[in-house]
Amino acid sequence: MKGGFKHEKEKTFNTVNTTSSLEDKLIQNAHIDKQSLFNKYNTSQNGLSTDESILRFETYGKNVITSKQKDSKFRRLLSSIVNPFNLILIAIAIITFLTDVIFVKGNPDFLTVIIIFILVTVSSSISFMQSEKSRNAVEELTNLVTNNSNILRDGKWIEIPIENIVPGDIIKLAAGDMIPADIRFLTTKDTFVAQSALTGESHPVEKFSNISSKDIDIITDLDNIGFMGSNILSGSATALVISTGNHTYFGSMAKTLSGDNATKSFERGVSSISRLLISLTLIMVPMVFLINGIIKQDWLQSLMFAISIAVGLTPEMLPVIMTTTLAKGAVSMSKHKVVVKNLGTIQTFGEMDILCTDKTGTLTEDKIVLEKYMNLHGEDDDRVLRHAFLNSYFQTGLKNLIDLAIINRATKKDLKPLTTRYEKIDEIPFDFSRRRMSVVLIDKDNKRQLITKGAVEEMLEISKFVEINGQVLELTDAYKKFAMATYEKYNKEGLRIIAVAQKNEVPKEHIFSVKDESNMVLIGFVGFLDPPKKSASIAINKLRDHGVRTIVLTGDSEGVTAKVCKEIGISIDHIISGNEVDSLSDQDLKEKLKICNIFAKLSPNKKQRIVKLLQEEGHTVGFLGDGINDAPALHQADVGISVDSAVDIAKETADIVLLEKDLVVLEEGVLEGRKTFGNIMKYIKMATSGNFGNMISVIVASIFLPFLPMLPVQLLAQNLLNDFSQVGMAFDNVDKEYIYKPHKWNSKSVLRFTLVMGPLSSIFDILCFSILWWVIGTNTVQMAPLFQAGWFVFGTVSQILVIYVIRTQKLSIIESRPSKILFISTLFVALIAIVIGFTDIGVAIDIDRLPISFILWLSILSLAYMISAELVKKIYLRRYNEWI
C-alpha cells in the first residue's frame, strides 16, 4: 500500500504496558471519523492486501494472549523442583551436610546427602516428564478445535483462523461470533454485545458505528469500540481491527481475567483431600517430635525425623499420579474424536450425574428439512414459502439451519430468480428476546415491504391483521384461536412451526428498528422436521444405566420437544415451559426438577438458572449445547460440552468439544472419567492409610525403643520406593461394578478408610518390631541398623502387597486382575527393597545386612497382613457399602 504502514512506530505504541496508555489509544480511535481511521491504519474499505497482512503478521505475531514471562521448559522444570516437599528434602540434606560433613569428628559422610539429592532429582524428573506429556497431550487436542473469522482481504471476504488477524483488518461479525481483537465498529445493525468477561455486567450493551460522543465512566462504556473477550449476542456488524493479542485491553488484564474463577468439582475435591492431609500432618508431626525429643534427648535428630515424618505423611507422587491418569484419559478420549480442553474435566465428567442438553442439533440430526409451507387453513401455499425465502435470503446475520432449509426448498421450487426483482433496504436482526427477524425490501416497482418470520406466539403479538382466502382481515380473538389451532395441530405431529408475516406500509426514509415490527399481516406458517439422532436413544439409555439422568433444556416448543423426547426414551409425563419457570421460586423450581425432564421455550438465562439450581442440590451437572443461547449454561455447568460445528462462543466456553456429533461418545467419556477417578482414589486411600499407619508405628516404637525405629534418610527412601511402586496405578484396570455409578470427592470417606486401614498396618508393624527385638535379637543401640533394615524391608514389601487388596473391592488378584504396568512396577520395587535389605547395598542408607532367616518371618507377616486386609475389607464393605 502507498505510504506503507508504520509497523515499528505502531508496535512501539502498542507495547506500552500501562493500561492507561491502552485506554488513551482506544479513546482516540473512538473519536475519529472512519476515513481518518482508515488513514491511520493504512487500510481501506477493501481491507488489507495479502502481502500487507503477511508483513503485519511478521511484525505483530499471532493474535493470542500470552503471559509476560514465557512459560519455557526451564521454568516448568524449575517449578517441578521447587515444591514444598522437595524444599523439605533439601533442608534435611543441608542439615545432614552440616552434621555429617562439616562439623563431624572423623571421616565425613557424604553418602546420605548424595542419596537425598538423588531422591529430589528422581522425583522432580518424573514430575516434569509427566507434566510435559500431559501438557503436550492437551495442546495437541486443543489444536484440533479452531475458531475462524470473516476477514476482508483484497476486497474479498475470506475465512481465516482468529490467531492470524492483524491490526488494520476489516472483519464481519454476526450473532454467535467472538470479538477476536479490539475493534472500532464501521457498520452496525442492532448489534448487542456481551462484555461480562471484562465488566462482570450480565446485561448486553448495544454498539454503534458513529463517532462516540457520550461521556464515559469506564473504557468499556465506549459504544463504538468492541473488546477482545466479548461476543456478539444479536445483530451484525463490520469493524476495523485496532489491536491484537497482548496489545488489546483484554491482554492488558490477562492476569486477572485469564481462566475461570469458578471452582470446579475437580479443584474442590483436590482441595478437600489436601486439607485432610495437612490436618493429619499438623497432628502427627509435633507428637513424633516431642516424644522422640523427650525420650531420646537428641532434639536435632528428633527435628529431622519429625520433618521426615511430615514428608512421609504426604503422598509426594500425587501430582504425578493425577497428571498421568488424567492425560491418559484425555488421550483415550481423543481416539473417540473428543477434545478435552482441561485435564481436570476428565474426572468431573465421570462424576456427572445429570446431563442437561439442548435439543436441536444435539438430540436431533441437525438436518432440518422444510416439510410444510401453508396458510392458516393448513393448506400448501407457495406465497408463504416465497415470503419466508425472501426473509432468509436477504438477511445478513447468522443463517441458521432453518434459513438454509427454507433456501434449499425455494431453490428446488425455482424461486431463486425472484431475488433479482428485490433489493434489501434494511433488516432487523434476530435476538433471543424477540425470537424473530425482519428484512425491508423494495421491488422493481418501488414497492416497499417488511417481511418478518419468527416464533408463533411472538409473531401473533405483533400482528394486527390476518390473511384468509386472499383477504386481509382484522386479527380477532376468533382468528387468533383459528391460527393457534393450525399451529398446535402440526406442532403435536412433531413439526417445528415458524410464523410468517408482512406489511406494505413501510416508510421511505427511515432507520428501521424493532418498533417497526407492528401492525403486521399474518399470512401463514412454515413447518420443519428435525428427526432425532439414531445414536441419541442408545446414548440416553446407556447414560441412564450408568446413573446419569438426562434433562432437556430447549428454546423450542413443547410439542416438537415432546415428540423428539418420546422417540429417544425421555419421559414426557412432565413438561414445563419458560413462562412457568419464570413464575416459580427457586425452591419450587427445585421441587419440579426432581420429577421433570423436559423444559421447553427457555431463554439462555433460564437454562443457566436451572443448571445452577441443580448444582445447589448437590448434583454434578454437564451441559451439552452448540448455540449462542447455550453459552451461559455451558459456562455455569461443571462440564460444558459442545461440538466443533458450534458457534465460536459455545466452543470457547465448553470444557469438552465433540469433533463428531455422536452422542455415544458421551458414555465413553463418563466411563473414562470414572476410571480416572477410581485410580486417583486408589492411590490417595492407599498412600494416606499406609503412611498414617507408619506414623502410628513410629510413635509406638519411639516410646519403647532406645533408638529411632528408622532414620530420616531410610524413611524417605522407603516412602519414595512405595510411591514409585504406585506409579503404575495410573494405568490400572478398574472393576466394572465401580464405573456403574458416579462417585464424588469425599474427604470423610478417605479419613474413615485411613482410620481403619492405617491401624491395621500398624498392628503388623508392631508384630515385626517384636520379631526383630525378641527373635532376631536387635535389642541394643548397637543393633539399631539391623532393626531398621528389618522394618525398612517389611514396611516397603507389605505396603506394596496391600496395593492388590486396596485396588479392588473384590478378592485381590483372583477376582480382579491388576494391569501389567502396575504388576511390573510393584514387583520391581519389592525386589529392590529386598536387595537393599539382604545385601551390603543397604550400607548406603545406614542399615545392616539382614540374616536369610528373616525371609521366613517376612513371608509369614506379609501373608498374614494380606489375609487380614481382605477380612477387614469384607467387614468394611458390609458396614459402609463402599471401598475405593
Image (cartoon, rainbow, N blue to C red):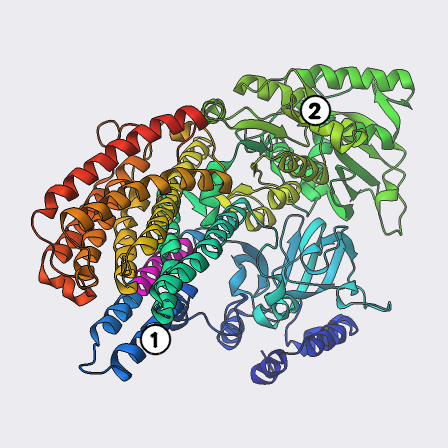
Closest to the observer: 548 or 563? 548
Placement of 1 over or under 278, stated as above or below: below
Q: Is 127 one of the magenta-colored residues? A: yes
Question: What residue is rendered at 54% in x and 42% in y?
Answer: 639
Residue 526 at least partly seen: no
The image's mark for residue 95 is 1
Provide the residue span drawn in magenta.
123-139
Q: Is 40 one of the magenta-colored residues? A: no
If the image is split into quadrants, where does the C terminus sit? Answer: top left
Residue 128 at least partly seen: yes
- Does residue 856 appear to the left or right of 404 in the view shown? left
Total marks in image: 2
The image's mark for residue 544 is none
User: What amino acid is labelled 2 in the image?
Assistant: Lys
Query: Can you tell which of label 1 and label 2 is closer to the viewer?
Result: 1
User: What amino acid is labelled 1 in the image?
Assistant: Ile
Q: Main secondary structure of the magenta part?
A: helix
**Image quarter for residue 808?**
top left
